Amino acid sequence: MKVMKKIAAFLFLSVMAFMLFSPAQVRAEEEREVVFVQVPGDWSDPCVWAWDEDGNNAFAAWPGGETEVYEDNEGWYYIHIPSWANHVIVNANEGSVQTGELVLKGGNVWITVEDAENASVSYDALTDGDIPDYVEKFLIHATVPEGWENPCLWAWSAPDGTNAFAAWPGSALKQGDDGWYTGKAPIWINSIIINANDGSVQTEDISIDPAELWITVADDGSYDFTYDDPNAVSAPDVNVYVKAPADWSAPCLWAWSAPDGTNVFASWPGEPFAEGDDGWLTLSVPGWVNSVIVNGNEGSVQTVDISVETGKDIWLVVTGAEEYEVFYEKPEGTGSADDAQTAETGNGDDESSSEKTEDAGQIDTPNADGNAGQTESTPAPDTEKSGVSAGIIALIAVVCVAIVAVIVGVIAKNKKKN
């Protein structure tokens, strides 16, 4: 009986340790800091691209997280970024202008951008007022009739009636190249209205779940919405086969879609290849991929950006950083240039190579313009590090082993007594 009590006490303490450990880890992963940004007058809609030293991106795709206007501080914008993301680039005009890489010490920071070549960083407050609280938000996309000008989003929480925006007609929606208007709302709202023409035309109240959605508004104000992206390209996976130089250890693949910059993998150097047949390395990627980089030695050696056709299996024969051949049918031997789309070689200073970090997201070394870490990458919605699950799994394993050891010991002791 005493032994069983000891086991029960041990189990209780283990569970308590697990419960204490998990929230602590989660809180650590959710810590965020505020980046305040002041940009030149001709820099519109500033964004911040952020990453850490291991190449983990804070945002899903270039140009990164959109900043918000900091009320009562003219010319200033702000954005919350994960505390682990200590490398940033400030950019604007849909990513066409940008600073170089800025390395942060940690904590809230104020960045003053004079031009693309000159930006200063201060850890002393350069704005007035309280530090804005972080509020998680989700995207709302809408298409509206042709006569609906300057559409806005009104959002609130029902039934308590807490409004997300200060006054009607709400937050202005921004139109994208695909014709959809987009805005953001805090995740605690569950009701929205799409309106336009200074609020004189509108939909009815729309009850929603707090998740990214697409709303289509008809001429009479009726609507239909979905949580599935209607513009998403559906394509089966394709296989990438590679032969890399012998001195490129542990080759990896970095893959993305250009020009939108959707990355397949979360961080550089991407995903390692598996051993295939006939000396080929192999890896499957989504069929929409049209750009790849083969790299090795933990990303320290790599090819230039390689454009490929979508929806087709690919065979790549890489003989150097700028020498490769692309095949869409398995070549005999190593293949010949007559059967392949052969890469153009250069000295690394051509347009494709110099924009490598913008298109691909690798952040191992800055390019000639100092634009390390600039990516058009995959967002998650905000990318969080994955230390939580690893720590929890490790703790569970330790607890299970300890429990088994105690039980085995008790059984052995009882056998000896008998």
Image (tube, helix red, strand yellow):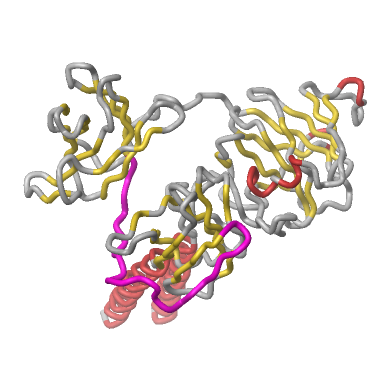
Coordinates of residue 287 in the picture (x, y in percent): 60, 27
- In the displayed structure, would residue 327 be above or below residue 190? above
Image point 53% across, 52% down: which residue? 91
Residue 55 in view: no
Decide whether the magenta segment is chiefly helix, strand or loop: loop
What number of labels is visible? 0
Q: Quadrant of residue 352?
A: top right
Q: Is residue 21 magenta?
A: no
Residue 136 in view: yes
The quadrant in which the C terminus is found is bottom left
Instruction: Please state if 32 lies on the left or on the right of 102 as rendered.
Output: left
Q: Is residue 129 magenta?
A: yes
Instruction: Please state if 4 lies on the left or on the right of 307 as rendered.
Output: left
- In the displayed structure, would residue 229 be above or below residue 371? above
The quadrant in which the N terminus is found is bottom left
Coordinates of residue 412 in the picture (x, y in percent): 45, 76
Image point 19% across, 49% down: which residue? 164
Q: Quadrant of residue 299?
A: bottom right
Q: Which stretch is magenta?
A: 115-139
- In the displayed structure, would residue 416 be above or below residue 397? below
Q: Nearer the viewer, residue 54 or 180?
A: 180
Instruction: Please state if 258 lies on the left or on the right of 168 as rendered.
Output: right
Coordinates of residue 96 in the picture (x, y in percent): 57, 44
Coordinates of residue 17 in the picture (x, y in percent): 35, 75
Image point 59% across, 48% down: which residue? 375
